[in-house]
Image (spheres, rainbow, N blue to C red):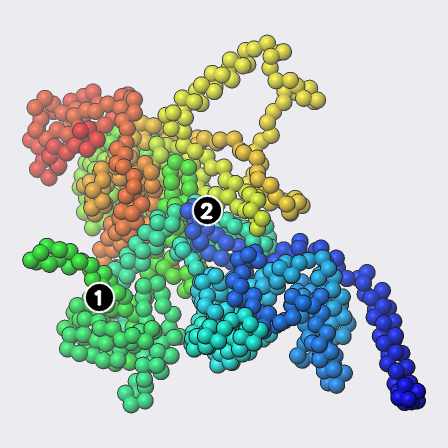
């Protein structure tokens, strides 16, 4: 019989022996490796690297930081088509095996025996989970055996749905995208739930080889891989033939997308990221923290757009610097596609679109842009382009497009929207038209603050973050110019001067040892105006009056006074140049000082992080800003003080019991905000305990605050800031600032609800050009921002405090006007400083203002 055949018996014995040896080897290996394997339960506790995300006060995304892009999903959020596509591509028997696919494993084992390496793998999805979460990527027998043991253990302890969820959130899918949600954003710019079947199949083809099958860098191989997966889905019964053919007919159109940023604030985001790293160390970028900030999305949008517009307008005032690059165009060989390919190396910068001139007509030019569209740029949009010579001079005005452009020029254009009114119907329509532009070489910065609590509402650190990450809003510092004068005048008012104090605006020479030379300061324009009231000197920015005021006050006394507004004494020059704003300050510091003026005289602390959540949603930090105490709050505080005084008069037995030290129990002082981030603290954070309300300290007399604000309102009404009257508000105040040779232009202004400071200049100080003062270069940006920032705030005229009186005065002497004096004007005074002496009757000076009245009197 066949059974008794010697060869058969030997074969059976050999197979039995091999099987037994395999069992012995497996058991021995299990006994050896088993104790060294990590507990599967840990896989549910492993924290995937999740990026740091920063949000506005409305919870709109500002930025995302982290080496790995990942947005973990729950199983219920994963599209069924994607699950089926992954199973078709990676592990068709996933729901039937117990972690190891014996057929695939046998195939991999044969490869290992025959070639000494494993190329095709044999890993199930469960084995890939074991490898991705616990093991290295080396291809060795020992690692594969560990993978098998872990996969078997994972299948015993986790459900299939849990395993798939772990898999789709961990896998690497190219271009720093980990997990399917991140890949959907990177390749298609939308959530995975919105992808088509073809797009889902494309992503499902990436785990095997993210580079080889990448739809951006290898579209043809990605297309082939996608179609194979769709065919497998049909074979497995996941889709029907119609769905397969429809999906295969869809082109492979993936391209790289950034994160869906909703608020453009890159300098602000980097500032927040650095703060997070200071608190948490390098893990700040990888542990899924969510930072909710004080930034208002619509305010930031307005600040961004105003800055871009203001710098482009400044740039146009100084001429056209020529093409950005030159392309040699061969009409017979170059197609729009080849030119479009060359344009890709020119980055679109905000609204500045790169394009190449392909044709020039009598009154227009044709420009091919990166999208492949050819657009028409009319001559009207390039009339400004007189050739740039330097910041002081330009060439002649162009008369036709050929005077400005040549075919092959790579230029920047912007689509400007203009309103057109129909002369017959009166209907106004907004149309877009392309015009020539260029990358601005000047820079700007802005800081906007809520003066009631110090919240940063908007922040601009420069024109383009990718070009320069230097944050001009908080770093460096530039001479403040006349924007510092309100603090000089505030000190003068506090020490007894009045808005009607007369100071002579006349030439003066100082021999100041600290300035190391004889100093002959002068007004802008070189003119002198004689005796001038303080109010007028401020709104017309008379330099020599400011110097004489400071000299009368004393520099040291004035510096001490200025430090109450948050300025560091070490940054303020200890000489008379302080009166002209020679201190190098940042927009952040100036806006902080102006916040004290805006809120009635209280020192607030600027802040920008409202609260921080960890990945689990626990609040690990919550801000506790100082608040300006309004009238209602002041009444509550007075009541609390009376209550505390009443409690202190109770018998000892009715008061708080002493603690075990024998002293009265005291509440713990609030910890510094960084204490909440002690590295030794447990990772499971809880919501911080509510912190006591903190109120801002008054640092400026209420009446002095009223007087200086009234004087600064005149800067807008009749002084160097009159452009701001276009806002049609009677509650705004501010001050322009311009340094020597117009190297820096400033405007800082406010009402009771919003403060904003704008700076314009060059990173390497040089003149901005003729007539580029604070009111010309910086104020238009401030106006465009405040038009949006203030639109929902009602007018809030400043309240006249107790102790302020109004007196009709002689504008030339500052004394009381005599009865019937025709040119008398009204002025505000503190009660104790009101003039008692009348001016002698005399013929009015025709060069002085007539009947000028502070608007608040009406």
Task: Give the quadrant of residue 132.
Answer: bottom right
Query: Which residue shows up at 22% across the image and 37% down it?
Result: 730
Residue 261 position, x and y percent, is: 42, 58
In the image, residue 197 sits, relative to residue 77, either above or below, namely: below
Compared with 281, 376 (above or below) is below
Question: Which is more toward the observer, 789 or 43?
Answer: 43
Q: Which residue is mark 2?
A: 293
**Cα distance, mark 1 to mark 2?**
37 Å
Residue at left offset 29%, top offset 21% = 803
| Residue 466 % position (x, y) | 42, 63
Q: Quadrant of residue 380?
A: bottom left
Pick the quarter of the image with the C terminus: top left
Q: Which mark is residue 75?
A: none
- Kindly state the secondary structure of the residue where label 1 is placed: strand
435 sits to left or right of 326: left
Mark 1: few/some/many CA within 10 Å (<14, 14-19, 20+): some
Q: Earlier in the sequence, mark 1 or mark 2?
A: 2
The residue at the point 23 percent across, 35 percent down is 535
Q: Looking at the picture, tell me which residue is in the foreground, 35 or 92.
A: 92
Q: Position of residue 729 (x, y in %)?
A: 22, 40
> Is residue 628 in view from this perspective?
yes
**Compared to 589, does 129 lie above or below?**
below
* x and y percentages locating residue 664 in the rendered image: 63, 20
Which residue carries the number 1 mark? Answer: 433
Relative to residue 356, is residue 117 drawn left or right?
A: right
Q: Nearer the viewer, residue 149 or 720?
A: 149
């Amino acid at each position: 019989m066949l059974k008794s055949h010697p060869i058969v018996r030997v074969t059976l014995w050999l197979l039995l022996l091999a099987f037994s040896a395999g069992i012995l080897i497996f058991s021995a290996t299990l006994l050896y490796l088993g104790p060294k394997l990590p507990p599967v339960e840990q896989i549910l506790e492993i924290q995937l690297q999740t990026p740091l995300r920063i949000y506005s006060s409305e919870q709109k995304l500002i930025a995302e930081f982290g080496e790995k892009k990942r947005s973990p999903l729950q199983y219920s959020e994963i599209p069924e088509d994607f699950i089926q596509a992954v199973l078709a591509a990676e592990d068709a028997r996933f729901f039937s095996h117990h972690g190891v696919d014996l057929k695939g494993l046998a195939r991999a084992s044969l490869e290992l025996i025959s070639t000494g390496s494993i190329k095709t793998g044999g890993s199930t999805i469960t084995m890939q989970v074991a490898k991705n979460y616990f093991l290295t990527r080396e291809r060795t027998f020992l690692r594969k055996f560990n993978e098998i043991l872990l996969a078997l253990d994972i299948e015993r302890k986790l459900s299939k749905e849990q395993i798939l969820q772990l898999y789709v959130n961990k896998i690497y899918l190219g271009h720093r995208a980990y997990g399917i949600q991140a890949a959907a954003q990177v390749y298609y710019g939308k959530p995975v739930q919105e992808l088509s079947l073809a797009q889902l199949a494309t992503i499902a083809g990436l785990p095997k080889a993210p580079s080889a099958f990448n739809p951006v860098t290898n579209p043809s191989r990605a297309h082939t891989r996608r179609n194979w997966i769709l065919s497998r889905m049909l074979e497995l019964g996941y889709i029907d033939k119609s769905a397969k053919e429809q999906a295969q007919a869809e082109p492979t159109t993936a391209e790289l997308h950034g994160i869906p940023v909703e608020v453009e604030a890159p300098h602000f985001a980097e500032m927040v990221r650095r703060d997070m790293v200071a608190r948490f160390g390098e893990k700040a970028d990888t542990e899924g923290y969510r930072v909710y900030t004080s930034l208002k999305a619509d305010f930031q949008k307005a600040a961004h757009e105003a800055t871009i517009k203001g710098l482009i307008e400044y740039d146009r005032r100084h001429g056209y610097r020529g093409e950005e690059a030159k392309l040699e165009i061969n009409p017979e060989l170059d197609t729009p596609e080849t030119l479009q390919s060359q344009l890709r190396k020119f980055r679109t910068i905000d609204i500045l679109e790169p394009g190449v001139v392909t044709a020039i007509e009598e009154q227009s030019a044709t420009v091919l842009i990166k999208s492949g569209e050819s657009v028409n740029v009319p001559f009207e949009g390039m009339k400004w382009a007189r050739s740039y010579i330097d910041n002081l001079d330009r060439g002649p005005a162009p008369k036709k497009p050929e005077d400005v452009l040549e075919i092959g020029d790579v230029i920047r254009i912007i689509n400007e929207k203009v309103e057109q009114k129909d002369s017959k119907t009166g209907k106004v329509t907004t149309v877009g038209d392309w015009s020539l532009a260029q990358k601005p070489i000047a820079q700007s910065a802005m800081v906007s603050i809520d003066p009631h609590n110090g919240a940063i509402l908007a922040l601009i650190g420069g024109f383009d973050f990718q070009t320069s990450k230097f944050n001009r809003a908080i770093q460096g510092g530039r001479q403040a110019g006349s924007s510092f004068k309100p603090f000089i005048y505030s000190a003068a008012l506090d020490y007894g001067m009045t808005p009607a104090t007369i100071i002579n605006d006349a030439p003066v020479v100082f021999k100041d040892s600290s300035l190391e030379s004889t100093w002959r300061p002068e007004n802008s324009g070189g003119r002198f105006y004689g005796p001038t009231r303080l109010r007028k000197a401020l709104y017309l920015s008379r330099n020599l009056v400011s110097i004489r005021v400071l000299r009368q006050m004393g520099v040291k006394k004035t510096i001490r006074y200025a430090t109450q507004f948050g300025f560091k004494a070490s940054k303020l020059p200890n000489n008379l140049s302080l009166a002209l704003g020679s201190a190098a300050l940042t927009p952040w510091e100036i806006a902080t000082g102006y916040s004290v003026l805006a809120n009635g005289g209280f020192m607030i602390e600027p802040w920008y992080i409202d609260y921080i959540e960890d990945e689990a949603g626990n609040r690990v930090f919550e801000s506790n800003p100082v608040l300006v105490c309004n009238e209602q709050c002041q009444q509550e505080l007075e009541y609390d003080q009376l209550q505390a005084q009443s409690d202190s008069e109770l018998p000892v037995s009715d008061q708080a019991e002493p603690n075990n030290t024998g002293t009265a129990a005291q509440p713990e002082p609030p910890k510094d905000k960084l204490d909440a981030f002690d590295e030794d603290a447990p990772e499971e954070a809880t919501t911080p305990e509510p912190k006591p309300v903190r109120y801002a300290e008054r640092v400026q007399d209420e009446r002095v605050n009223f007087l200086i604000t009234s004087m600064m309102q005149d800067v807008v009404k009749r002084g160097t800031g009159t452009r701001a009257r276009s806002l049609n508000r009677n509650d705004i105040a501010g001050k322009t600032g311009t340094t020597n040779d117009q190297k820096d232009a400033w405007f800082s202004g406010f009402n009771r609800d919003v403060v904003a400071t704008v700076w314009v200049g060059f990173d390497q100080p040089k003149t901005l050009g003729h007539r580029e003062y604070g009111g010309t270069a910086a104020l238009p940006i401030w106006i465009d921002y405040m038009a949006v920032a203030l639109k929902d705030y009602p007018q809030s005229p400043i309240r006249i405090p107790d102790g302020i009186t109004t007196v009709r005065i002689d504008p030339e002497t500052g004394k009381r006007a005599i009865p019937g004096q025709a040119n008398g004007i009204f002025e505000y005074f503190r009660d104790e400083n009101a003039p008692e002496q009348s001016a002698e009757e005399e013929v009015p000076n025709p060069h002085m203002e007539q009947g000028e009245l502070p608007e608040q009197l009406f």
